[in-house]
Image (spheres, rainbow, N blue to C red):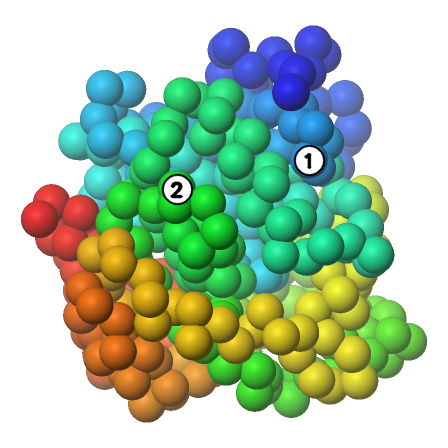
Amino acid sequence: MRTDESLPEDRPLSPDDWPDPAEQRYAERQARLADRYGVDAASRVLDTDAAGRIHYLAAGDPDGEPVLLLHGVGLPAATWLPLVPHLADEYRVYAPDRPGLGLSAAPSYRDRDLRSFLVAYLLDLLDDRGVERPHVVGNSHGGLQAFLLALDHERVDRLTLVGAPGGVSRDLPLLFRLLTVRGVNRALFWLMGRGDPVENARQSMARVNVVDDSALPESFYELLAAGAGLPDREASQRSLATAQGSFGRAHPLFDLREEIYGIGRPTRFVWGTDDSFWSPDVGRPVAERMPDADFHELPGHGHTPWLEPGEEAAALVRSFLDE
């Protein structure tokens, strides 16, 4: 693996380091959102063999135990920023943009061995940072990646699933079933991209991620709007959608329950009652069959519970890491 010479990893990046105007705009809004939450986050890149350029945020105590934050299918790493202040005093936090989102490269997911490709860049990042077994916090698609890090590579210490994780059911919501169909997903991306980007971001968050968006500042939506204008990201996201299923049927990776039951690492599920993917009734039986797992239900919370008003989700994550 190589550090990109034009965007050096050994120092924090500023928005001016990005040559593309859309990437520079995104980096500016990412920095603004970090300031909004009082987070001193370094924006860094690593050129990986697995997936090309990987951008990640690094924050917290450089000598603290490492925590890897893995975001969902449609939200970038910066959407973890509201959680970071709850961890940064004692933990070293790494939040990478999955390829195709944020400031990471935007490769095609077609014709890939999805099970290995989804975690290969994470292994490169962990190896580069000298981290053998971090605590891993995963949301949605990031939960699927967290399971794979534990199952295939034993690279997880404590495992936290915040919001319904991929890997526990192939029964996807209608919108995500439609996105697996080529041609249909192109039309859907076009429809969802019409109009004002900030308003589109607000509607998307309400449709999929949160029940109550009153805790989210305007700078949060401005970041998501800037992300929609990044080059090649839509094509990469569409390729991921079709790689993860076909004609409305999810990829087998979305049901790893028989394997998940055997994960022996300490595990916590934090699940909103109003999660747009699956109800707590889908996740609770999984937790009950794991050897060292607990399950916490958050009334009135959606798919990204740390973005809802209040600190219940953040407190559950922090208390578990502290055990």
Chain-order first, disc 1 or disc 2: 1
The 10 Å Cα crowd at callout 2, few under 14, some 14 to 19, many 20 or more, is many
Residue at image point 17% right, 31% down? 90
User: Where's residue 260, x and y in %?
Assistant: 39, 68
Q: Quadrant of the N terminus?
A: top right
Question: Which quadrant of the figure has residue 295?
Answer: bottom left
| Image vertical order of residue 287 relative to residue 234, above or below | below
| Image vertical order of residue 91 relative to residue 259, above or below | above
Badge 1 amino acid: Ala
Residue 121 lies left or right of residue 100; in this view the side is left
In the picture, the disc for residue 263 is none
User: Where's residue 69, x and y in %?
Assistant: 40, 46
Residue at image point 62% right, 32% down? 54
Q: Mark 1 — residue? A: 50
Q: Mark 2 — residue? A: 155
User: Where's residue 275, x and y in %?
Assistant: 40, 80
User: Where's residue 203, x and y in %?
Assistant: 58, 73
Badge 2 amino acid: Arg
In the image, 316 versus 231, the foreground residue is: 316
In the image, 187 versus 27, the foreground residue is: 187
| Res. 174 visible in picture | yes
